Image (spheres, grey):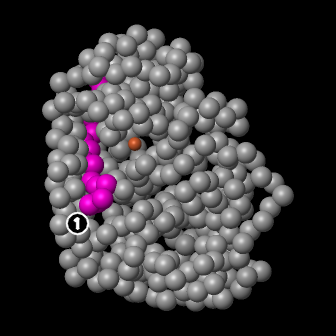
Amino acid sequence: MKKEVKSVNYGLEKIFDGAQDFLPLLGTDHVELFVGNAKQAAHFYKTAFGFQSYAYKGLETGSKDSVSYVLKQDKIRLVLTSPLSSKNPINDHIVKHGDGVKVIALWVEDAKLSWEETTKRGAKSFMEPTVEKDEHGEIVKSGIYTYGETVHLFVERKNYKGKFMPGFVAWDSDYKPEPVGLKYIDHMVGNVGWNEMNTWVKWYEDVMGFVNFLSFDDKQIHTEYSALMSKVMSNGNGRIKFPINEPAEGKKKSQIEEYLDFYEGAGVQHIAVATDDIIQTVSDLRSRGVEFLSTPPETYYDAIPLRLEEFDHELSEDLKTLQSLGIMVDADDEGYLLQIFTKPIQDRPTLFFEIIQRMGARGFGAGNFKALFESIEREQGLRGTL
Ligand code: FE2
């Protein structure tokens, strides 16, 4: 396994010498999901994942055709949106895809320039630069389409002092479940169709100025039954990382193919959120009913000390505790990481969450892919979709 991980090309010098980044990104602004029932989904994210009520728009604020609940935990902002009548086109998105991520919003210094630079490089426009004002100042928004029906919104908020955006009001609630220690979005993964990975890699390079930072082929990512390929794209300052997966031929149906069937197209596969204390976070999440993929077998944990030794790292956490919670460990030259994956968080086997704690490693858990996929295949077997 050591050889496989070492064979990947980090190519970071390419990222950090970026003399002219035409699309400087300050970070992830928010993620918006289109869901069937935003009010109930908001309760789920508060109760299960420890998000806090933050902002709201709906009938009471003059939004006649849709309702949105904004939830926050440290730097993470989730927006949950539902239509209020059959005429709203958000319905079409939900009918086709089920609940899922519609918008990955990126925080920028200049939303007009971001739109101009990307559309002139071939991006399809979703929203022309638009200024929205209220008593707290103004926000400039623009947007482009990426894979499937997913959208990147550019959000410029330097002249805004309000809570979220014009159109929203602060949402106070007496119900404040304790946060679980989720800090920020580490990466967001997209699943695209057969033979489309390189098309989207090139799109992120050409249109967004991203760099291909890590690659895994089907020889590295496979089990007895299925395979996939993945390339990790990063922006110039390394704050935004988007791995892109495509299915590969195997004896049985891969999890990417299952996703594409149920999402009915390309879309966001998982949102990876960072914590500083994965043991506490996962203990909390489990006690609140969040379901995780099954724990890897004993043999997986038996191999961990050797894997860390190969890279000369010492585990600060107790391995037995990690095992009891089903947390996986991977290592590379720079350090190690701890990660775990939830089961899908809606009825269709599509979107899920990853909880990740980085202890120096900048990878994505390549050493865990096999154990992870075997675990997903056990679930697929139960669903009859393997
Ligand atoms: Fe991930």
Whether residue 165 is visible to the viewer of this picture, yes or no, is yes
* Residue named by callout 1: 209
**Identity of the residue drawn at 42% across and 37% down:** 358
Residue 237 spot, x, y in % from top left: 30, 59
Seen in the image, is 103 located left or right of residue 218?
Answer: right
Q: In the rendered image, which quarter is residue 55 located in?
A: bottom right
Vertical placement of residue 174 versus 156, above or below: above
Quadrant occupied by the C terminus: top left
- Element marked by disc 1: loop
Residue 325 spot, x, y in % from top left: 57, 24
Seen in the image, is 386 located left or right of residue 202?
Answer: right
Vertical placement of residue 134 versus 231, above or below: below
Vertical placement of residue 190 versus 207, above or below: above
Asked whether residue 348 is drawn in magenta, I would say: no
Q: Magenta span covers which residues?
A: 222-238
Residue 187 spot, x, y in % from top left: 40, 50
Three-letter amino acid code of the residue under disc 1:
Gly
Q: Residue furthest right?
A: 174
Seen in the image, is 226 located left or right of residue 17?
Answer: right
Asked whether residue 224 is drawn in magenta, I would say: yes
| In front of the other: 74 or 383 | 74
**Identity of the residue drawn at 44% across and 31% down:** 338
Whether residue 88 is visible to the viewer of this picture, yes or no, is no
| In front of the other: 46 or 363 | 363
Residue 331 spot, x, y in % from top left: 33, 27
**Identity of the residue drawn at 44% across and 69% down:** 107
Quadrant occupied by the N terminus: top left
